[in-house]
Amino acid sequence: MYAYLILTLACFVLTHNQQALLRLSFSGAVGIFMILEMIRFGLIQPFGRMVDKFICSFIDDRDRGPLIVSHIYLLIGCALPIWINNQVSFHPLCPFAGVIILGIGDAMVCSLLKCQ
């Protein structure tokens, strides 16, 4: 739950001061997550099994399957409003929509379900 608070605060500060850096950081993170998932899925040597073991320690029963993309979906959900806001400026709070909805929403669900 505290991770979402830190993410929200970091995105607020970076969106006001360094929006280009935040867009670049999200793009790099999505790319790294996709490469790691390809390595994990293909069991590419020498890191495939190590990445698979590490990522599988963070998933639950809903993510079991050949591809584990929920981490990538959450990251894209946070980044998409910032990427879109670069092209078209709507409301000043639009860049924060993904972080607010995913961060606060997931933290509320976690606190209601007593997640640790």
Image: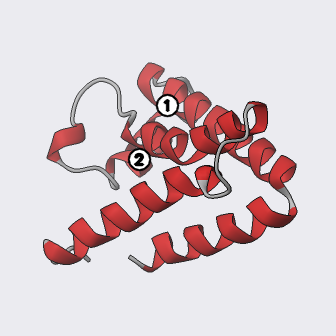
Within the image, what quadrant is residue 101 found in? bottom left
Q: Is residue 115 visible?
A: yes
Q: Is residue 66 above or below residue 71?
A: above
Q: Tell me the amino acid under the disc marked 2.
A: Ile
Report how many numbered discs are placed on residues in the image: 2
The residue nearer to you, when weighing 50 against 58, is 58
Identify the residue shown where x is 27% and y is 71%: 108
Residue 112 picture quarter: bottom left
Q: Seen in the image, is 21 located left or right of residue 39?
A: right
Question: Is residue 46 visible to the viewer in this orientation of the structure?
Answer: no
Residue type at mark 1: give it. Answer: Glu
Residue at numbered disc 2 = 55
In the displayed structure, would residue 74 be above or below residue 14? above
The image shows residue 85, relative to residue 14, as above or below, that is above
Disc 1: which residue: 37
Distance (Cα) linking label 1 and label 2: 9 Å
In the depicted structure, whether residue 30 falls above or below residue 94: above
Quadrant location of the C terminus? Answer: bottom left
Q: Position of residue 71 (x, y in %)?
A: 43, 44
Task: Looking at the picture, tell me which residue is in the foreground, 87 or 11.
Answer: 87
Asked if labels 2 and 1 touch by Cβ distance under 8 angstroms, the answer is yes
Residue at the (33%, 62%) spot, across then down:
105
Q: In the depicted view, which residue is nearer to us: 19 or 4?
A: 19
The residue located at (54%, 48%) in the rendering is 78
